[in-house]
Image: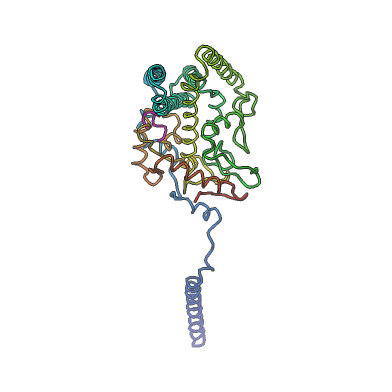
Amino acid sequence: MEPKKSNKLSNLWIFLAKVALVTLVQEETSQSEQDNPETITPVSQEEDELSKVKLPRKLPSIIDIKRSIPAHCFQSCVKTSLYFAIKDAILIIMLYFIGELLLTYLPLWAIVITAPLFWFVQGTIFTACFVIGHDCGHGSFSKYDLVNDTVGTVMHAFLMTPYFGWKISHKNHHKNTGNIDKDEVFYPIRKKLSTPGLALPGFGLALGYFGYLVFGYKPRPVQHYNPFQKLYVKHVLGCFISLGCLCLWSWCLYNYVRNEGCVKLFYHYLVPLFIFGSYTVIITFLHHTEEEIPWYSDEKWDNVRGQLSSVDRHYGIVHDVLHNITTHQIHHLFPKVPHYHLEEATRAFRAAFPDLVNIRTDRTLPAFWRMFKKYAKQSVIPNDTQVYLYK
């Protein structure tokens, strides 16, 4: 019996020694990993790329965000929408007659002094009309497609913009906001797709807008006056109707020139049209191009991340005149919110998700010039970029 008891004690001591040795090895390994960080398991490439972005790693779903916004903010009212559309039209007509009085009764030197103010105000109202048409394109003007398309076609034709072509390409922009590989305009361009050439300073302002309508934005150009673009294959009839309305409006302008002359066309229409086009370039660019606002490759992109890559700004005295379109994050998250509910919806969103909010408060034109210079230097990116931020 004694030898068996001795063997049992011996085995017990061996087992305890092994446990102690394993524990010691584990402690030494752990200490070694702390002393040598290189031995720690590296973060995956995806995690490392997304760590550049100042957003929570786990984002709420679009449904979660929608629940934070009062339900009535998603409801449009035909009477309210028509009120804003008619008000803008009346303001344009009133300003036209004010301009006529200025041309008729002021001496030349006074006309030269007052003209820039007149052009700025009229061009701002032109832009407000465009925002009304923009609501029509999103279906946030009313719940009736015929009403939306009729009002939108009239508003856009007045501004020499083909409503259906712009509506479809703009929806493509909303479907792919912040996506390097699929967005519509002002996206960073992979080096293999870039073409040599310099952008006009400030994109040429209105020249850039109308150039975009004619030629599209390379390397994924959509020619808005061409109804046979691949993007328009299901909307050819609508595109032709838009072009027909543009032809009718051009004929009206031709007859206006025959009766009133080129000078009045320049004073009353062409310069305010240039102001409108410049507004459109500035607004579109600044609300998607800013320091620390991420762009994602198609593999890293998802709807919530992409729509959050937009920026809210406040344009001072013209903010309300432009129908609050500069509250851009909610507009991108929920394009069906009518412009007259954007401010309320934005307040609710900011209160519920403060860590998702992007607001910039610097002055508009200096911000535009600052970011244009960065864009000109930094917009061509490496071919394998997964997440990109301007610095």
Report the residue at 47% width, 48% height from top.
291
Question: For residue 312, what is the image quadrant?
Answer: top left
Report the residue at 65% width, 24% height from top.
228
Q: Is residue 292 a member of the stretch shown in magenta?
A: no
Image location (x, y in percent) of residue 163: 53, 23
- Can residue 81 be seen at all in this image of the molecule? no
What is the image's colouring?
A: rainbow
- Can residue 301 be seen at all in this image of the molecule? yes
Tell me the magenta residue range. 319-326
Nearest the eye: 190 or 378 = 378
Image location (x, y in percent) of residue 361: 38, 43
Question: For residue 184, what is the image quadrant?
Answer: top right
Report the residue at 37% width, 21% height from top.
80
Question: For residue 64, what is the image quadrant?
Answer: top left
Nearest the eye: 46 or 307 = 307
| Rendered position, 236 above or below 48 | above
Nearest the eye: 160 or 123 = 123
